[in-house]
Image: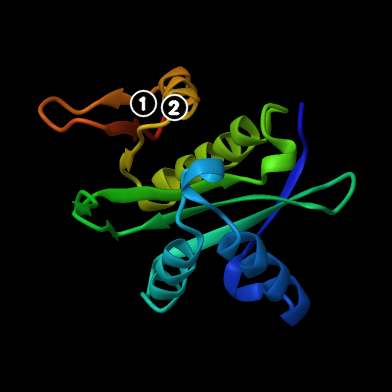
Amino acid sequence: MVDLSACPLDTLTADEHVAFFAWIEGMTVDGDREDGPAFAGWLREHAAIPGDVTWVFYSQGSGALAGTASLIRRDRSLLAPADGWVLGGVNVVAAVRGQGVGAAIMRWIDSELRQRARKQGRPVRVLLQADNPVAVRLYERLGYHSVDGIPGVYTAVYALDAK
């Protein structure tokens, strides 16, 4: 199992911030399924929106940057349900793909959403957009299912009593 530590993007040191955005801006559509400069702009936009949060994940063993994920209210045309969030910006550093980092990030997000459901005293519904077959299989294993009539959109409900 991969052990990760997470910290909110807005708590990174100046050097960590530079390294994080160097990784993001270096992403390519062919290699990473992301337009790096556009994704960097997306992250900066969401950093300014109250309530939206992006986490940066590091390997606990090496301290190396491993990935990122965000819980936000709106991802382009996808609007969060009133009782939940949009999971966006889930990415894994290319050098550690296929090693369980994506699953570890999703386990961390799963725990975060369950804590939010308990604190709020109600279930939390999450939407996400995905077209990467590997990511879709991971999301489905974690209980996400496709939303009828909206291709590429998936949902999960984090209930109060769910494990």
Q: Position of residue 72 (x, y in %)?
A: 36, 58
Q: Amino acid at mark 1?
A: Tyr
SS at mark 2 in the image: helix
Quadrant in which residue 1 is drawn: top right
Q: Amino acid at mark 2?
A: Tyr
**Callout count:** 2
- Among all residues in the image, which is located at the extreme front? 30
Q: Position of residue 148 (x, y in %)?
A: 13, 25
Image vertical order of residue 145 relative to residue 112, above or below = above
> What is the number of the mark on residue 73?
none
Disc 2 and disc 1 in contact, CB within 8 angstroms: yes
Which residue has dot 2 on it?
A: 139
Quadrant in which residue 154 is drawn: top left
User: Is 40 left or right of 57, judged from the image as shown?
Assistant: left
Q: Position of residue 139 (x, y in %)?
A: 44, 27
Q: Residue at x 73, y 37 (%)?
A: 96
Quadrant in which residue 145 is drawn: top left
Q: Position of residue 2 (x, y in %)?
A: 76, 32
Callout 1: 10 Å neighbours few (<14), some, many (20+)?
A: some
For the residue pair 122 and 76, the one nearer the viewer reads as 76
Image vertical order of residue 123 relative to residue 67, above or below = above
Q: CA distance from mark 2 to mark 1?
A: 5 Å
Q: Earlier in the sequence, mark 2 or mark 1?
A: 2
